[in-house]
Amino acid sequence: MSTPTEEILQLLTSVDGNQPWNRIRGKRNEEGQLIKGEPEEAWQAFMHYRNMQYLPLTDGEGPRRLLRVAERLNKKITLIQRWSSKWNWPARVLAFDRAMISKQAEEDAWQLQKARERVAWQTQMLAMKGCHALKQKAAGIENARDQL
């Protein structure tokens, strides 16, 4: 069984499956004509845009920006805007963000449960030590009475 953290990493790196943020593949319309899918270059730009917010913010990078994608990939902003519009980047990253938030909530709940289990175990151990110490103290008092 994988942990929620591993599932989040799978979401970030997955290109398989039928998720809205995955690459849009070519398909046939009702008339049987082939509709081209998302080109590799547009897909790579989308992945860059999609993952921006979840990468470590080591360079002071803020939220997603099409301009930042254009700058990083050395592309014209008009091309990035056209890809974003044509391949529906806003809806796809929204779906991705919602999935990430859901997985993060699962991770938080899992971590909380583990913390509760640790606290319960530690409490039980302290209670056992306390009982043992009280028994020893009581036995010592009884021994002292017997010697009187």
Image (tube, rainbow, N blue to C red):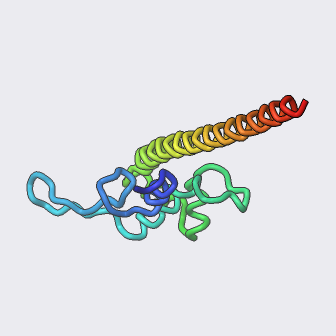
- Residue at the limit of the structure toward the right, as seen here: 148
Q: Position of residue 3 (x, y in %)?
A: 47, 54
Q: Position of residue 28 (x, y in %)?
A: 15, 59
Question: Is 118 positioned to the left or the right of 80 in the image?
Answer: right
Question: Is 88 positioned to the left or the right of 54 in the image?
Answer: left
The answer to whether residue 82 shows anywhere in this view is: no
Q: Quadrant of the C terminus?
A: top right
Residue drawn at x 78%, y 31% as measured from the top left = 138
Residue drawn at x 47%, y 46% as measured from the top left = 103
Q: Nearer the viewer, residue 117 or 80?
A: 117
Q: Nearer the viewer, residue 55 or 107?
A: 107
Residue drawn at x 24%, y 63% as measured from the top left = 26
Residue drawn at x 77%, y 35% as measured from the top left = 139
Number of marks in picture: 0
Q: Position of residue 19 (x, y in %)?
A: 34, 52
Instruction: Reply above or below: 76 against 97.
Output: below
Instruction: Reply above or below: 119 against 84.
Output: above
Q: Nearer the viewer, residue 21 or 27?
A: 21
Question: Is 19 positioned to the left or the right of 52 in the image?
Answer: left
Instruction: Reply above or below: 5 against 115.
Output: below
